[in-house]
Image: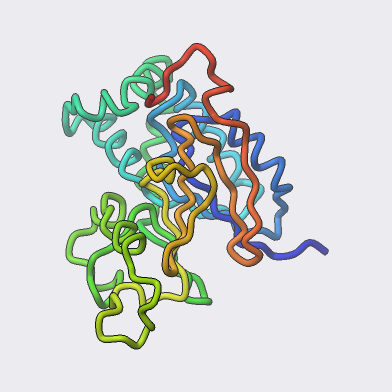
Amino acid sequence: MSLKRTLVVGDIHSGLQALKQVLEKAAITENDTIIFLGDYIDGWSEAVETVNYLLQLKENYNCIYLRGNHDELCYEWLTGQADNPTWFMHGGEATSNSYGKATKETKNTHLKFYESLDNYYLDSESRLFLHAGFTNLKGIEHEYFKKTFYWDRTLWELALSLNTDLDKDHIHYPKRLTNYSEIYIGHTPVTRIGKTTPQKAANVWNIDTGAAFKGPLTVFDADSKEYWQSDPVYTFYPNEKGRN
C-alpha cells in the first residue's frame, strides 16, 4: 500500500504541460492529498485547459485548491467586475485569449471553480498552506482583510530577514510564525532571490519556483521534504513569453 503523502504544488500559471510532467514524476496516487497553492492561470497560453485538467484531476484524487491573487483577478474579469490593465500586463492577456475560445458553459463551470477555492488549509499537524501570507499576530482566524491570504508578501519577507540566532521564545521572535509548525506558500517566486528550488526561511517554505518566468514547476512532499520538478516551463511553450 502506498504512503499517504501530503504533496504541495507551486504556482502553475497555465503551464499545463509542466504540470502533467511533474505530477507524473511525483507518481501521485489516490492515497495522496495534493494541495495546490493557487495561481492556476495567467502566464502561458493554456489557461482554460489547465482549469479543465484540475477539475478532472479532482474526480480521481484528493485535491485541495487554494485561491491565488491571479485566480481572483481572472474571476473579477470573467464576472465583469473590473477592467484591469495591470492584470492584462501580468499574464492576464494570455488568459483572456484562452477564454476567448471557450464556450459559455465552460466559463460558467470555471466560475464555480474560482468561487470554490479556499483561502487556506490547516492540517492536523498545524501545518498551514496558503497562497501568500497573513499579517495578524494571532493567526489566520483573526485576519481582518481576507485578500491578505492571497496578496501578502510581508510573511515571506519577514521569514527571509529573520535573525537565525533568535530563539522562538525570544521577545523579538515574530509572533506570526509561532502559530503554526510549518507554513507553505507560493506567490513570490524564489527566482527573485536567484533560486529555482523550494526555499525554507524560519518555518516558512516557499514552493513558487518561477513557473511563470524561467523556472520549473514543483511538487513538494511536506512530510519527507522530497520534491520533483518539471523542465523549465518556458521550454514547453517556445513561441511564448509567459510573464518574462
Residue 133, above or below 126 = above
Quarter that holds the C terminus: top left
Residue at 34%, 71% in the rendered image: 163
Q: In this view, does 136 lie to the left or right of 49?
A: left
Residue at the limit of the structure toward the front, as seen here: 165
Residue 188 falls left or right of residue 87: right
Residue 176, image x, y percentages: 30, 73
User: Given the current orientation, which residue lies at the most extreme right position?
Assistant: 1
Going 35% across and 88% down the picture, which residue do you hit? 169
In the displayed structure, 241 sits above or below 144; it is above
For the point 66% across and 65% down, the residue is 224
Q: Observer-nearest residue: 146 or 176?
A: 176
Q: How is the image coloured?
A: rainbow
Q: In which quarter of the image is residue 242?
A: top left
Indicate the position of residue 149 as horizontal and vertical percent values. Answer: 30, 57
Q: Is residue 194 left or right of residue 152?
A: right
Counting from the top left corner in percent of width and height, residue 8 is at 55, 54
Number of residue marks? 0
Left or right, 52 with respect to 59, comes to: left
Question: Viewer-proximal residue, 20 or 172?
Answer: 172
Q: Where is residue 220 in the image (x, y as percent from the top left)?
A: 59, 54
Rendered view: 9 above or below 78: below
Q: Quadrant of the N terminus?
A: bottom right
For image coordinates 37% across by 49% down, the residue present is: 67
